[in-house]
Amino acid sequence: MLVNDERYCVNVGCFGLDALMANTVHDVKTLKIAAYVASILRNISAKVKVIGQNGLLFNDQVTLCAFCNGRFYGGGFKISPKSKINDGLIDMVILPKVNRLFAPYYIYKILRWSFSQNP
């Protein structure tokens, strides 16, 4: 996958909350889980514009957006359980912008979905 006409991604390319967290999680010098929570609340959404070969596919605020050729990323999170690296398809996972008050609910759902045995 080519991202921003300059970088290639093989497994999962993520944008939004998870990418912003990766860039800011080390700004908080405390317990690891507290750093992630602080980063989540600070970076609840991002503007994402997706252009495919046939034109504009998506242009809006998201909490999480991932393009997946593989199933897992970020230490074992199963972001796209049905993705297959050899099927010739790129799966797109989008969580639209959510209110900060509902962020813990969505984080719980993503973690539960990610680590369940049956996707």
Image (cartoon, rainbow, N blue to C red):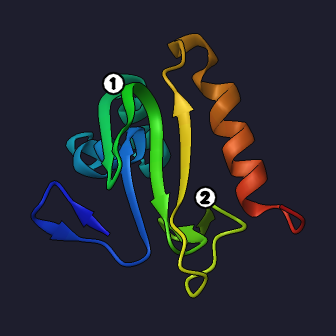
**Residue that appears at 70% across and 27% down:** 105
Residues at marks 1 and 2 touching, judged by CB atoms closer than 8 Å? no
> Which of pointers 1 and 2 indicates the residue nearer the eye?
2
Image quadrant where residue 62 sits = top left
Residue closer to the observer: 96 or 24? 96
**Residue 111: percent from the left, percent from the top?**
69, 50
Whole-angstrom CA distance, mark 1 to mark 2, is 22 Å
- Quarter of the C terminus within the rendering: bottom right
Label 1 sits on a secondary structure element that is helix
Residue furthest to the right: 118
As drawn, 31 above or below 85: above
Mark 1 or mark 2, earlier in chain: 1
- Residue 10 placement: quadrant: bottom left
- The x and y percentages for residue 9 are 30, 72
Q: What type is the residue that disc 2 sits on?
A: Ile
Q: Is residue 29 visible?
A: no
Q: Can residue 55 be seen in this view?
A: yes
Tell me: residue 70, above or below residue 108: below
61, above or below 99, in the image: below
Alpha-carbon neighbours of circle 1 within 10 Å: few (<14), some, or many (≥20)? some
Observer-nearest of 116 and 71:
71
Q: Mark 1 points at which residue?
A: 42
Check disc 2 and report the residue beneath it: 79
